[in-house]
Image (spheres, helix red, strand yellow):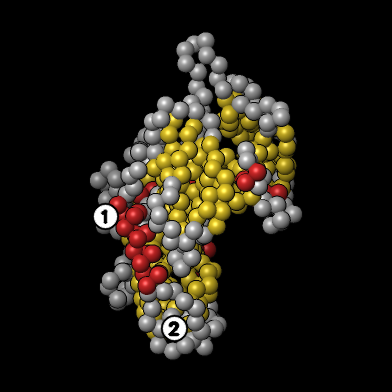
Amino acid sequence: MKFNIRSLAAFSMICFLTLFVGCGSGGGGSSSGGSGGTGTLALSLTDAPADFQAVYVTIERVEVHLGGNENSPKNWQEIPPPDSGVSPFVKKTYNLLELTNGVLEGLGMTELPAGHYTQMRLFIGEDPDDGVNIFGDQHDYANYVVESGTTEQIPMKVPSGTQTGIKLVRNFSVVDGQRTELILDFDAAKSVHRAGSSGKYILQPTIKVIGTRALGYIAGTVFDDNDNPLPGVLVTAQQYDPLISDDEKDWVVIENTTSTNEDGDFFLYVAPGLYNIVAYKDTYSFDVQCGFDAAAFDVSGATVELTLADLTPEGESGVTEYGYVGGKMTVAAVGGGNVTISFRAPGPEEACGGNIELKSETINNVGEEPVSYNEILPVAEEPYYYDVVAWSGVTTEVRSGVTVKSDAITVLDDFKL
């Protein structure tokens, strides 16, 4: 199995630094009451995949809160670039889609008073750097997407609220004479939203902060039913927990997401624990390994192998083994909102605990006028069926026992959220 050298090197370095240098606890409050002395905070950037050819985001700077009044500039410290040790932070325009499958990009490093910290903030730039994109063209915009099969730079509007910085709430400790490593996981798929039918995009950053003291990983390969590596497969590490909430949308927890590379390989950073590893691609079946144990710093080489069957018929007389689920939805709230719709199947083994999510879709700017959706899914008939869960910021609706027939549309209308 082949992984990007940057992925494995970065993970090995994280293991080394955290095991032998440590990220212990210390101090109390937002760095006040620390143990004295200073330690090092190092930040790296990674991303989950998105359905674009490229997604460029310019990061102006990153700051850490030193405690006290959040509105006072003196209570925030800028984190300079790695290995420079000095400010100012050098803005950079990143292609987030080059940072998938465990690839890490050094973002910043600084000395801080030893103690406990609670938050950081990240500033999105308004002007690009002087670099070029994947086509060798200069950046026309600080933040933009390139749709699949095109070279056009389509700018993303950044909401005005991000001018004060994107707040990243995450407790971490800096220990005297030691180094703390954090990973900022910038989820492009959840951060980039189409602005209705205008063809424009909005950037609403969704970022998870991962601490490397308790960090595991899941690596593996996905094959087709002819044992060929299968690229472009959505792979998720997820858990099922119906006790987490009374709201069914929360019962499937997606820890991390990626897609397989050209060799069918994938790599996911996760917190240690048991996960259901689900692989799915449109017009293919899905596969899952239930209860995979991702132990912290397990570098034993244990990997996951998953196989998807091609559901496209061979020849004109063949039968398509997939169909469609589609319909319309509305949002009653004033001003409308975004709707997420999740397609879930029963876990095939008791170890899965319950449903697994095959795929989900976020539909933007849904209002009182009906908005359509349409998704491909493998054929499913009783007693095998799907649960379809849709939610807005206020309401969740669940449709259980949904069947899908060959080359037909199962209509689920009247989602009123």
Is residue 190 visible in the rendered image? The answer is no
Q: Give the class, few, some or many, for how many residues have Cα within 10 Å of label 1's Cα (few <14, many ≥20).
A: few
Q: Amino acid at mark 1?
A: Gly
Task: Identify residue for label 2.
Answer: 114
Q: Amino acid at mark 2?
A: Ala
**Residue in view at x 42 percent, y 78 percent:** 77
> Looking at the picture, how far across and down is residue 352, in whole percent?
62, 45
Image quadrant containing the N terminus: top left
> Looking at the picture, how far across and down is residue 219, in whole percent?
43, 48
**Residue in view at x 52 percent, y 53 percent:** 293
Residue at mark 2 to residue at mark 1: CA–CA distance: 36 Å
Q: Is residue 293 depicted above or below 160 in this figure?
A: above
**Residue in view at x 40 percent, y 60 percent:** 45
Q: Helix or strand or loop: what does disc 2 sit on?
A: loop
Task: Identify residue for label 1.
Answer: 131
Going from N to C along the chain, the mark reached first, 2 or 1, is: 2
